Amino acid sequence: MSLRNALLALLSSGPMTGYDAAKKFASSVGHVWHAANSQIYPELRKMEREGLVDTREVPWGSKGETKTEYTVNEQGRDALHEWQQEPMSYVADRDPARLKAAYLEWGTPQSAASFLREHISHFENQRRLALDEIHRVESGGNPTLVRRLENVPDRDRAKVTAFKRFSYEGRVLHAEAEIAWAKRGLELLAELGEI
């Protein structure tokens, strides 16, 4: 997946200014694909140049200023369909936690235990965020999903909601696996007499 696909997916729920896209990105697709605002704005302009989105100037503020609003066009929708038809390309992992774990002997028992506890804390937070998103999806409290559902035929609404939930369920399972792995690391430190 690329930032382009994430932005096309986000914009498929309806027109947005760059500011709105950046803001909604963090609370929507940003849960599964991280991008800084400094990446979002140039990618939107690139998508416009490549004909994937249409733009128009919309009023902003009280001094007659405008902002650019982006709308996915037919070519952009085609790109989303094509992306979904492509096989997933997996890349070699860069896994800093496993790299660090492979060489814990270079630190102290305290630094190893601290690393593992921080890993647990981080993924407990990630699990909580994913569970919160599942609740928002189920309760109708996810504004991007609500907006998307307004433009979806009734027959497809349950499917759209189920796929959003499925995505966050994957985040929960991933977080739980990371927590279990780090807890096993703490057990290993105890078995080795390190803590």
Image (cartoon, rainbow, N blue to C red):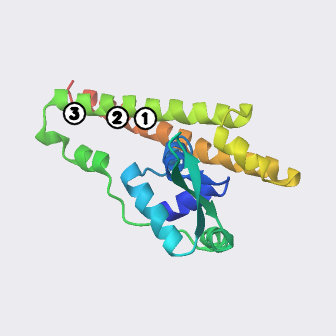
Amino acid type of disc 3?
Answer: Ala
Which residue is depicted at the point 55% across and 36% down? 130
Report the disc number at residue 51: none
52 left or right of 109 in image: right
| Residue 142 seen | yes
Q: Residues within 10 Å of mark 1 (few under 14, many from 20)?
A: many
User: Measuring 80% from the left and 47% from the top, which residue is drawn there?
Assistant: 158
Q: Are marks 2 and 3 in contact (CB under 8 Å)?
A: no
- Whether residue 2 is visible here, answered yes or no, is no
Which residue in the protein does label 3 denote? 112
SS type, badge 2: helix
- Which kind of residue does numbered mark 2 sit on? His
Amino acid at circle 1: Phe
Please, which residue is most extreme toward the right here? 155
* 46 vs 158: above or below: below
Work out whether residue 174 or residue 188 is closer to the camera in this orientation and state it: 174
